Image (spheres, grey):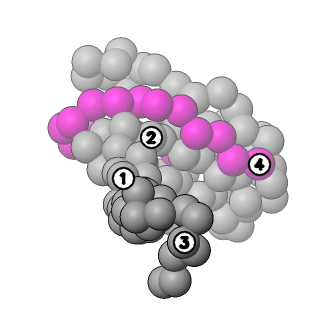
Amino acid sequence: MRIPKFLGLGAGVAAVAGLVVANTVPAVSASADAGALTLCSKGGYASYVVFPGGTRGGWSTFVIPNGQCYTTHAGGNANEDVDVYDADANQYIASTIYNGSVGETIVTIVGPSFYAYNG
């Protein structure tokens, strides 16, 4: 990197420091999914999830219309059951495990069914 003379050494140090910070920002945002619960209704029907019993006592998301996603900060740091529902048919689909230390994304698909992944 060529530093113009009128900027001096201080500007060069600041520019290098800026590059170091810029290269470390993605590592910080990679942990942003911890505590997040995302539900995407992609199966042609609205959906919602429920934490049955346990410490959350039946807490649920809003009904998420088909074609939309919703993310909430559910927190937590232990494995918890989550039940996934087809809201249009008021039908239980299946359960998955949520752990707030890594977050969870649930995507409903035609079936009705869903797939889930961490983050």
Q: Which residue in the protein does label 3 denote?
A: 5
Q: Which residue is mark 2?
A: 36
Residue 51 sits inside the magenta stretch = no
Assign the magenta stretch its main secondary structure. strand
- The residue where tag 4 is placed is 68
Q: CA distance from mark 1 to mark 2?
A: 15 Å
- Mark 3 or mark 1: which is in front? 3
Q: CA distance from mark 4 to mark 3?
A: 53 Å
Asked whether the residues under the numbered discs 4 and 3 touch, taking CB atoms below 8 Å apart as contact, a structural biologist would say no
Residue 9: quadrant of the picture? bottom left
Tell which circle, 4 or 1, labels the residue nearer the N-terminal end. Answer: 1
Task: State the residue in front, 66 or 93.
Answer: 66
Specify few, some or many for label 4: CA neighbours under 10 Å numbering under 14, 14-19, or 20 or more: few
Q: Secondary structure at mark 1?
A: helix
Q: Residues within 10 Å of mark 3 (few under 14, many from 20)?
A: few
Q: Of marks 4 and 3, which one's residue comes earlier in the chain? A: 3
The three-letter amino acid code for the residue at tag 1 is: Val
